[in-house]
Image: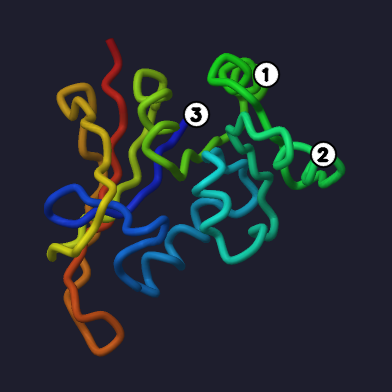
Protein backbone atom coordinates (compact mmCIF):
# COMPACT_ATOMS: atom_id res chain seq x y z
CA UNK A 1 0.00 0.00 0.00
CA UNK A 2 1.26 3.46 -0.91
CA UNK A 3 0.45 6.23 1.54
CA UNK A 4 1.15 9.94 1.18
CA UNK A 5 1.89 11.57 4.52
CA UNK A 6 2.18 15.34 4.87
CA UNK A 7 0.99 18.43 6.72
CA UNK A 8 -0.47 21.49 5.03
CA UNK A 9 -1.93 24.83 5.99
CA UNK A 10 -5.31 26.21 4.91
CA UNK A 11 -3.84 27.24 1.53
CA UNK A 12 -2.33 23.76 0.90
CA UNK A 13 1.18 25.07 1.54
CA UNK A 14 3.68 22.50 2.76
CA UNK A 15 7.14 24.06 2.85
CA UNK A 16 9.36 27.12 3.06
CA UNK A 17 13.00 27.08 1.97
CA UNK A 18 13.06 23.28 2.12
CA UNK A 19 11.64 23.02 5.64
CA UNK A 20 8.28 22.90 7.39
CA UNK A 21 6.95 26.42 8.09
CA UNK A 22 5.58 25.29 11.48
CA UNK A 23 6.57 23.23 14.48
CA UNK A 24 3.85 20.91 15.78
CA UNK A 25 5.31 18.28 18.12
CA UNK A 26 2.22 16.04 17.98
CA UNK A 27 2.39 15.99 14.17
CA UNK A 28 6.03 14.89 14.28
CA UNK A 29 5.07 12.16 16.78
CA UNK A 30 2.18 11.09 14.51
CA UNK A 31 4.60 10.91 11.54
CA UNK A 32 7.01 8.77 13.55
CA UNK A 33 4.30 6.39 14.80
CA UNK A 34 2.97 5.80 11.28
CA UNK A 35 6.28 5.52 9.42
CA UNK A 36 8.45 3.61 11.90
CA UNK A 37 9.60 0.24 10.50
CA UNK A 38 8.33 1.14 7.01
CA UNK A 39 10.14 2.45 3.92
CA UNK A 40 9.82 6.19 3.33
CA UNK A 41 9.99 7.50 -0.23
CA UNK A 42 11.19 11.01 -1.00
CA UNK A 43 13.12 13.28 -3.30
CA UNK A 44 16.70 14.37 -2.58
CA UNK A 45 15.72 17.82 -1.29
CA UNK A 46 13.29 16.28 1.18
CA UNK A 47 16.00 13.83 2.27
CA UNK A 48 18.43 16.72 2.76
CA UNK A 49 15.85 18.57 4.88
CA UNK A 50 15.73 15.74 7.42
CA UNK A 51 17.75 16.33 10.60
CA UNK A 52 19.44 12.93 10.07
CA UNK A 53 18.73 9.52 8.60
CA UNK A 54 15.57 8.55 10.46
CA UNK A 55 16.03 5.42 12.56
CA UNK A 56 14.15 2.20 11.84
CA UNK A 57 13.18 3.26 8.32
CA UNK A 58 14.63 2.62 4.87
CA UNK A 59 14.94 5.84 2.90
CA UNK A 60 14.12 5.48 -0.81
CA UNK A 61 15.42 8.65 -2.45
CA UNK A 62 14.68 9.78 -6.00
CA UNK A 63 17.74 11.63 -7.29
CA UNK A 64 19.71 11.86 -10.51
CA UNK A 65 22.67 13.38 -8.65
CA UNK A 66 25.54 10.91 -9.10
CA UNK A 67 27.60 12.34 -6.22
CA UNK A 68 24.62 11.89 -3.89
CA UNK A 69 24.13 8.32 -5.11
CA UNK A 70 27.81 7.47 -4.53
CA UNK A 71 27.71 9.05 -1.05
CA UNK A 72 25.01 6.61 0.08
CA UNK A 73 25.75 3.52 -2.01
CA UNK A 74 27.14 1.59 0.98
CA UNK A 75 24.48 2.72 3.46
CA UNK A 76 21.83 -0.01 3.84
CA UNK A 77 19.30 2.52 5.16
CA UNK A 78 19.39 4.60 1.94
CA UNK A 79 18.43 3.38 -1.52
CA UNK A 80 18.87 5.92 -4.31
CA UNK A 81 16.80 5.51 -7.48
CA UNK A 82 17.62 7.72 -10.44
CA UNK A 83 14.27 7.96 -12.24
CA UNK A 84 10.53 7.74 -11.70
CA UNK A 85 10.61 4.55 -13.78
CA UNK A 86 13.21 3.04 -11.41
CA UNK A 87 11.15 4.20 -8.43
CA UNK A 88 8.05 2.50 -9.85
CA UNK A 89 10.03 -0.71 -10.37
CA UNK A 90 11.23 -0.56 -6.76
CA UNK A 91 7.64 0.02 -5.56
CA UNK A 92 6.38 -2.91 -7.66
CA UNK A 93 9.01 -5.16 -6.09
CA UNK A 94 7.90 -4.07 -2.60
CA UNK A 95 4.14 -3.79 -3.09
CA UNK A 96 3.39 -6.09 -0.15
CA UNK A 97 4.97 -3.51 2.18
CA UNK A 98 3.40 -0.37 3.64
CA UNK A 99 5.20 2.45 1.79
CA UNK A 100 5.09 6.09 2.89
CA UNK A 101 5.72 8.94 0.47
CA UNK A 102 6.89 12.01 2.41
CA UNK A 103 7.65 14.48 -0.40
CA UNK A 104 8.59 16.56 -2.17
CA UNK A 105 6.16 17.89 -4.68
CA UNK A 106 7.67 16.09 -7.69
CA UNK A 107 7.47 12.71 -5.92
CA UNK A 108 3.87 13.33 -4.82
CA UNK A 109 3.06 14.37 -8.39
CA UNK A 110 4.74 11.29 -9.91
CA UNK A 111 2.87 8.86 -7.65
CA UNK A 112 -0.53 10.51 -7.20
CA UNK A 113 -2.26 8.04 -9.52
CA UNK A 114 -0.86 5.09 -7.51
CA UNK A 115 -1.53 6.30 -3.96
CA UNK A 116 -3.93 4.18 -1.88
CA UNK A 117 -4.12 6.22 1.32
CA UNK A 118 -3.67 9.86 2.32
CA UNK A 119 -2.49 10.79 5.82
CA UNK A 120 -2.91 14.55 5.93
CA UNK A 121 -2.43 16.92 8.83
CA UNK A 122 -4.65 19.92 8.06
CA UNK A 123 -3.50 22.95 10.06
CA UNK A 124 -6.10 25.65 10.77
CA UNK A 125 -3.74 28.53 9.97
CA UNK A 126 -1.79 30.02 7.08
CA UNK A 127 1.97 30.39 6.91
CA UNK A 128 4.54 32.05 4.66
CA UNK A 129 5.55 29.27 2.29
CA UNK A 130 6.99 28.65 -1.17
CA UNK A 131 5.83 25.08 -1.75
CA UNK A 132 2.26 23.91 -2.37
CA UNK A 133 0.92 20.36 -2.25
CA UNK A 134 -0.06 19.12 -5.72
CA UNK A 135 -3.77 18.87 -6.42
CA UNK A 136 -5.25 15.51 -5.52
CA UNK A 137 -8.64 14.31 -6.70
CA UNK A 138 -10.41 13.84 -3.37
CA UNK A 139 -13.43 12.44 -5.24
CA UNK A 140 -11.34 9.28 -5.61
CA UNK A 141 -10.97 8.97 -1.82
CA UNK A 142 -13.21 8.52 1.19
CA UNK A 143 -12.48 10.13 4.55
CA UNK A 144 -12.11 7.19 6.93
CA UNK A 145 -10.79 8.88 10.06
CA UNK A 146 -10.60 12.38 11.52
CA UNK A 147 -8.92 13.30 14.80
CA UNK A 148 -9.22 16.95 15.85
CA UNK A 149 -6.63 18.68 18.02
CA UNK A 150 -7.41 22.02 19.64
CA UNK A 151 -4.74 24.66 20.08
CA UNK A 152 -3.07 24.27 23.47
CA UNK A 153 0.02 25.25 25.43
CA UNK A 154 2.19 22.97 23.24
CA UNK A 155 0.78 24.18 19.92
CA UNK A 156 -0.93 27.47 19.15
CA UNK A 157 -2.75 26.02 16.12
CA UNK A 158 -5.73 23.71 15.83
CA UNK A 159 -5.22 20.85 13.39
CA UNK A 160 -6.78 17.61 12.21
CA UNK A 161 -5.24 14.26 11.41
CA UNK A 162 -7.21 13.08 8.35
CA UNK A 163 -7.03 9.62 6.81
CA UNK A 164 -8.46 9.08 3.33
CA UNK A 165 -8.67 5.71 1.57
CA UNK A 166 -8.95 5.31 -2.18
CA UNK A 167 -12.44 4.21 -3.18
CA UNK A 168 -12.70 0.77 -4.75
CA UNK A 169 -13.95 0.68 -8.35
Q: Residues within 10 Å of mark 2 (few under 14, many from 20)?
A: few
Nearest to the eye among marks 2 and 3: give it.
2
Which residue is the site of mark 2?
73
CB contact under 8 Å: marks 2 and 3: no
Nearest to the eye among marks 2 and 1: give it.
2
Q: Is residue 98 above or below residue 28?
A: above
Which label's residue is closer to the chain start, 2 or 1? 2
Q: Secondary structure at mark 1?
A: helix
C-alpha gap between disc 2 and disc 1: 19 Å
How many numbered marks does the figure carry?
3
C-alpha gap between disc 2 and disc 3: 26 Å
* Viewer-proximal residue among 39 and 142: 39
Which residue is the site of mark 3?
1
* Viewer-proximal residue among 127 and 151: 127
Where residue 45 appears, as percent x and y from the top left, is 51, 47
User: Residue reaching furthest bottom?
Assistant: 153
C-alpha gap between disc 1 and disc 3: 12 Å
Which residue is the site of mark 1?
93
Which label's residue is closer to the chain start, 2 or 3? 3
Which label's residue is closer to the chain start, 1 or 3? 3
Amino acid sequence: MITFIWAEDEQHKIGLDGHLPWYIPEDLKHFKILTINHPIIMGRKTFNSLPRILPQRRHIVLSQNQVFKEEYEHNPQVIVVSSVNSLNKWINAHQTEQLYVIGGVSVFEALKDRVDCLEKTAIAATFPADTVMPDLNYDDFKLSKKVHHQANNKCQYSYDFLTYLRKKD
